[in-house]
Every structure is written in structure tokens, then in C-alpha cells.
């Protein structure tokens, strides 16, 4: 298991244990037109997933943190916003949901596209954010799948693109690949994904990052091929109150590939207030 030691910025952690616990299921909730998952009680911990993600990406994070936090995973309306779907539109949606749930002082976690949305939300509504956690975030640079779509009917191509997301290719299970394959072979969904992917590339936040005032934890896989390690270093350099933690033998989605290590880092950060 991971040693229970206080982490220092720049630390690299490596998972020593792979768990095979049965995946927990969570109940979708709604308030008005907004859909989300919520578990536990305590300070709000809001988790935002990436372009092809879902609540499943955070399954073990929810299970771990619901003991001490109200863990909320918004259902991102990527396919419901028409061709106007963009990082900005999704950030506005998150703001509306947070208002509807009467949340403040939130801990905001974002992976990949979710990190980009979290950054924009933090820039636009800093009064609501107690801390920001970026995990393989877009916003500066990314090698995305969506921008090069699509060889939609080529299952092996989609499988290889999914596998490169992880250090361990087998993390891209058949179920995950099948879900992506089904999505990109839906012409309307594929078009919306392409619009959103282009939006993330155009919406570069480099000039705004210096204005972020809350504490920021940056968690990155050393072998991230989508948002390479130098991207993490750039975020760390540009965001004033940020700390960077590495996970070795890990790709673009640490909370799915190395959840035990990810939970350890996040728990230490939240307890320290930094």
C-alpha cells in the first residue's frame, strides 16, 4: 500500500497495489434541467470528467471521499447543447448547477476537458472555489483524439487511440472502447465532439492563469501522452499557488488507472488546506 507520508511538491508516486474491488454504482439525481451524481456529506467536492469520460472514471474517488465530503459529479450535457457546445458553454452549465444546488467553497477537480472547464469556472467565479485540482488538464496543450476524427468505422483505430490514453493499455477495457466506438459512430455526436475538441484548442488560458488565487493541486501521470509532462510544469509555473505531484507508470487518467495513489495525493492536499 502507499506509505502515509506528507507529500512535497514535485513528489513522484508509484502504485504498489492494484485493487480489483467490484465497481460501485451511483444514482443519478436531478434538480430542474440539471443532472448529477451526489454521495456523502460534508464540504462539496465537485468532480469533472473528460471528453469521453463518465461518472465511472471517478468511481473509486467517490467511494473514498464520500465518507468526509459531499461528492458531486455533474452529468456534462456534451450532446445536448447543439453545435454551440464549447468549453465556455459547459463552464456556464456547471455554474448554473452549482447555483441550483446552493453550493459555495467548493473543491473543484477536473480531468482533461474537465480540468479546462474547472479552470474557466475558477477564473469566472473565484468566490465560489476553495481549491482547484487539475488532472491531465487541457487549457494549454493537448494531443486530442477528437480533433483528428474520424476513422469512425475502424474499431482497431479507436481501440489504439483509447489505449494510448493509459500507461497500461489494458486499462482501456472492451467496455470502454465499445462506448467510445458507439459514440463516434453516431454522426451527430461525432460532429459535436469535433466542435468541442476544436473549442478546447482555441480556448488557450495561458494569459489568464496568473490571476488564479486559490490553492491549486496539479496531479499528472509521468507517461501522459495526451497532455505531456511539460504541460503540467507549465501549469505549475503559471498558477501562483500551485503544487505539482507526479504519478509514475501512469497516463492521462490517474483516478482511473491509479486510483489509490490519486486518492492519497488528493486526501493529503485537502487535509493540508494547500
Image: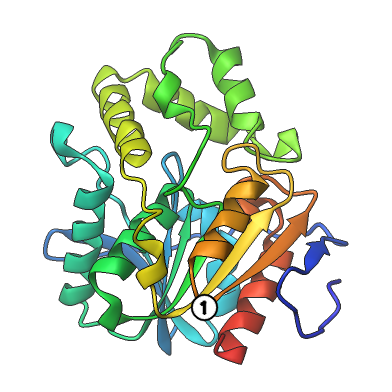
Using the image as rendered, state which of residue 161 and residue 67 is in the foreground.
Answer: 161
Q: On the rendered image, what quadrant is the C terminus found in?
A: bottom right
229 horizontally vs 84: left or right: right
Instruction: Identify residue for label 1.
Output: 241
167 horizontally vs 39: left or right: right
Residue at 81% in and 57% down: 18
Q: On the rendered image, what quadrant is the N terminus found in?
A: bottom right
Mark 1, other Cα within 10 Å: few <14 / some 14–19 / many ≥20: some
Rendered image quadrant of residue 11: bottom right
Answer above or below: position of 48 versus 41.
above
Residue at 44% in and 19% down: 148
In this orientation, does residue 24 appear?
no
Residue at 73% in and 66% down: 261
214 horizontally vs 61: left or right: left
Secondary structure of residue under mark 1: loop
Instruction: Return the x and y of residue 166 as percentages of the image width and height.
Output: 68, 40
Answer above or below: position of 111 versus 79.
below
Amino acid at each position: 500500500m502507499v506509505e502515509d507520508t506528507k507529500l512535497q511538491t514535485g513528489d513522484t508516486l508509484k502504485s504498489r497495489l492494484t485493487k480489483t474491488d467490484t465497481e460501485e454504482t451511483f444514482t443519478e439525481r436531478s434538480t430542474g434541467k440539471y443532472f448529477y451524481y451526489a454521495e456523502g456529506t460534508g464540504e462539496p467536492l465537485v468532480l469533472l470528467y473528460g471528453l469521453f469520460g463518465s461518472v465511472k472514471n471517478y468511481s473509486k474517488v467517490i467511494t473514498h471521499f464520500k465518507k468526509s465530503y459531499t461528492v458531486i459529479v455533474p452529468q456534462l450535457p456534451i450532446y445536448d447543447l447543439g453545435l454551440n457546445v464549447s468549453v465556455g458553454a459547459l463552464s456556464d452549465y456547471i455554474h448554473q448547477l452549482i447555483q441550483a444546488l446552493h453550493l459555495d467553497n467548493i473543491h473543484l477537480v477536473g480531468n482533461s476537458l474537465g480540468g479546462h472547464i474547472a479552470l474557466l469556472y475558477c477564473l469566472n467565479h473565484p468566490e465560489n472555489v476553495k481549491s482547484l485540482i487539475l488532472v491531465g488538464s487541457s487549457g494549454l496543450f493537448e494531443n486530442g483524439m477528437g480533433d483528428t476524427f474520424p476513422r469512425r468505422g475502424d474499431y482497431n483505430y479507436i481501440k489504439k487511440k483509447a489505449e494510448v490514453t493509459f500507461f497500461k493499455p489494458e486499462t482501456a477495457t472492451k467496455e470502454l472502447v465499445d462506448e467510445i466506438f458507439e459514440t463516434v459512430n453516431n454522426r451527430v455526436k461525432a460532429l459535436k465532439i469535433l466542435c468541442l475538441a476544436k473549442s478546447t484548442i482555441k480556448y488557450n488560458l495561458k494569459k489568464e492563469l496568473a490571476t488564479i488565487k486559490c490553492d491549486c493541486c496539479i496531479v499528472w501521470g509521468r507517461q501522459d501522452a495526451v497532455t505531456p509532462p511539460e504541460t503540467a510544469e507549465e501549469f505549475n509555473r503559471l498558477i501562483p499557488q500551485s503544487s505539482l505531484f507526479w504519478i509514475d507508470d501512469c497516463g492521462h487518467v490517474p483516478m482511473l488507472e491509479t486510483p489509490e495513489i490519486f486518492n492519497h495525493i488528493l486526501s493529503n492536499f485537502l487535509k493540508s488546506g494547500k
